[in-house]
Amino acid sequence: MISQQVIQDTAYDIMGRAAIDIPPDYRSGVEFMIEKEDGLSKFVLQTMMENWDAATEDRRPMCADSGLPRYYVKVGNEAQYEGGPIGIEHALREATARATHDIPLRPNRVHPLWRTDHNNNVGINAPEIDWSFEPDADWIDITTVHKGGLFGTDYRMLFPGDGIDGIKRFFLDTLLSYGKRGLACQPAIVGIGLGGSKDTTMVLGKQAACLRVVGDRNPDPKISELELELKELGNSIGMGAMGFSGKSMVSDCHIEVGYTHTGGMPMSVHMFCLSSRRATARLFADGRVEYRTDPQWFTPYMRRETTSWQN
Amino acid sequence: MAELSEGQKVVRLQVPVSHDDIKDLEIGTVVYLDGVIYTGREGVYKRVIEDGHEIPLDLPAVSNANFHCSPAAAIEPDGSYNVGGVTATASFRFAKWMQRWFELSGAKIIIGKGGMSSSDYRELFVPAGAIYLTTVGYGTGALLGRGIRKVRQVEWFEELGNAQAMWVFEVENFGPFIVDSDLDGNSLFEQQAEQVNKNIESLYQGLKKPALSRYGETDDRNDELI
């Protein structure tokens, strides 16, 4: 039985890890990009590396826009946990409020109309908690992501006849729109959602950006190829960090798909940022907790195509 | 410190700055600040300019550097402050308040993310004798957090909340920042964007347009959207 207290304390703990420690996959992705840069773009990326070191040394957030802190929960089908799903949601809201004060995170969450701020990143529909499930498992994975909320995302309904050209154009449009002046805080992991219902398109793209690591490839070889092609296209724009002339726009590109309306090909683009903040913990039935920076969110079960699941 | 590009200079300025301190600054120069700076963004601007509240600081005597920022900071039960990181927010949204803000605050340095348009610089900043410093990369929250020596005061915490309140910081070797706009209103961002724009047409070459168009203010990818 996984206790309420362990859930809350672990959810609290990963908030700090996400805010402070840059994930190694993203860091090495940027190290690789610096090699190809010079001038202002190189100065900017090297300064970001210094910032990550300062954050880890001082145990302070690497970026003060600690975004919209939120959780992704994957529950093993065999997991036993105290308090049920309502208990988990309560623990995650408590953890968010405690972590906001203690780390501290910026209390970004306000009412959209009245701008009321509870100063703890908790409110109506906040923090978001996305659920998924995993067969043959008795653990719970909890991931937190802190992503800024203003720039770098767009949605468009494309049609099958628009083809790969349409995808490339919208990809470029979004990167140019938000890349100028570096509003998207690039170089970024770019997530693309293709298909599904319109809301699913947005969710898939967001998860592709935030829950897959640099170097990870979609298991479908043709999609994997498209990921690499779009990454290359983004880096050929001639734009780098802060929108300065450079080559570092896309540290990786991840595509996730969902079966969609026969007449449509909806697409979303999401850019994560220079402080790609994510941290995951696995809570085991015996009370152990293991930490990692790869959320391993997209499992074969999540990408299943058939009516029933057979591993 | 990160490698400077060719010809790039580094300066350290004491805030409040004088006209002489900033008159020779060139775009692209790296700047570190000492002295006192304050945060102010839409919450403060609305409260002062639209709602008519007095600025609760003696500006510009205390400081003439306005940071478009909300810190990742907390106030402890004993009233002490815990400032983790500080990072800028995108400045272009605040252009509509800047003219009046310059008049009321006497600000000579605006610090933020992403700069403003060069027409804003010419029409608002140049007459006010003000420059714009951009934060680097954006998210150098930890480096900037290190530069904060003390929270001098926090105004309107109850009224505006933690993120929009006016935080007054004593800072030392606070940076790095890059000069985006000098006193003539030149813009580093726009200069860089011109280089990027040269390649845009070739990027779209051969890609056919989607079947369904969109209403929009611009289809010209050379345009800036701010």
Image (spheres, coloured by chain):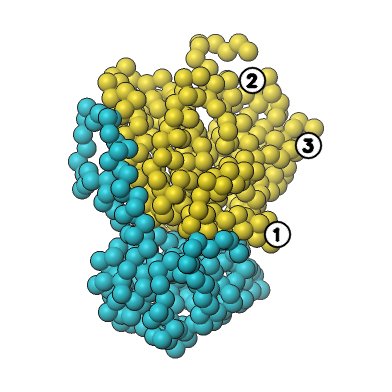
Of circles 1 and 2, the one toward us is 1
| Residue position marked by numbered label 1 in the rendering | A57
Q: Position of residue A262 (x, y in %)?
A: 32, 17
B41, A217: nearer the viewer: A217
- Up the image or down, A218 lies above or below B199; here it is above
Q: Which chain is cyan?
A: B
Q: Chain of mark 3?
A: A
User: For the point 49% across and 14% down, which residue is it?
Assistant: A305
- Same subunit: marks 3 and 1: yes
Three-letter amino acid code of the residue under disc 2: Pro
Q: State the SS at label 3.
A: loop
Q: Which residue is mark 2?
A: A135
Residue A63 in picture, x, y percent from top left:
55, 57
Q: Residue A288: which disc? A: 3
Q: Name the subunit of mark 2.
A: A
Quadrant location, the C terminus of chain A: top right
Task: Name the N-terminal-most of marks 3 and 1.
Answer: 1
- Mark 3: give few (<14), some (14-19) or many (20+) Cα within 10 Å: few
A146 over B210 or under it: above or below: below
Q: Mark 3 touching mark 2, by CB under 8 A?
A: no
Amino acid identity at mark 3? Arg
- In the image, A121: left or right of A168? right
